[in-house]
Amino acid sequence: MNFNHFLAEYRIWFGVLASVAFVNGFLAHRELLKLYAQRQDLLRSVGIIRVDWWFRCIWGAMQLGFGQAGKSLPWFSRLVFKGIGFHYAWLLLLALLMALGVLKI
């Protein structure tokens, strides 16, 4: 299947996912900056040294959403960090499908 055909077939879903991912990324960045100002010890416990969105920061955000370290966070913060995990998962799935040749650019 061609990626353009795939994109055209699921255009509405990609639009919704992209919009939600953009808003979720903004909210997660805001939450991480708030935690950086108030609870650096919690961020260090999941491996986040600074909010730079490299691999360690992304992995730490997912640990805050799904792991034991984030249990003390409010439900909204955990939901936002779980959203980061969800959005990176579907992006990785699309990249894997392209790498396997199921979707062609």
Image (cartoon, helix red, strand yellow):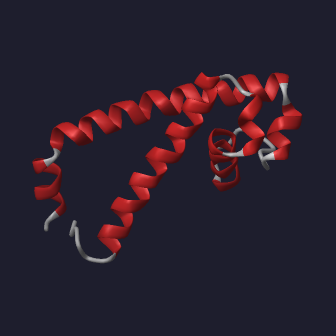
Judging depth in this view, the residue of 45 and 15 nearest the camera is 45
x%, y% of residue 71?
Answer: 73, 34
x%, y% of residue 21?
Answer: 42, 36
Q: Residue at x 47, y 46 (%)?
A: 86
Instruction: Tell how many labels.
Output: 0
Give left or right: position of 49 versus 85.
Answer: right
x%, y% of residue 90?
Answer: 39, 53
Which image quadrant for residue 97? bottom left
Q: Residue at x 65, y 26 (%)?
A: 31
Residue at the limit of the structure toward the bottom, as seen here: 100
Q: Vertically, is 83 above or below 5?
A: above
Q: Vertically, is 73 above or below 49?
A: above
Q: Residue at x 38, y 61 (%)?
A: 93
Q: Quadrant of the C terminus?
A: bottom left
x%, y% of residue 1?
Answer: 13, 68
Give left or right: position of 65 versus 101.
Answer: right
Q: Residue at x 59, y 36 (%)?
A: 81
Which image quadrant for residue 44? top right
Give left or right: position of 34 versus 94.
Answer: right
Residue at the limit of the structure toward the right, as seen here: 41
Give left or right: position of 41 versus 101.
Answer: right
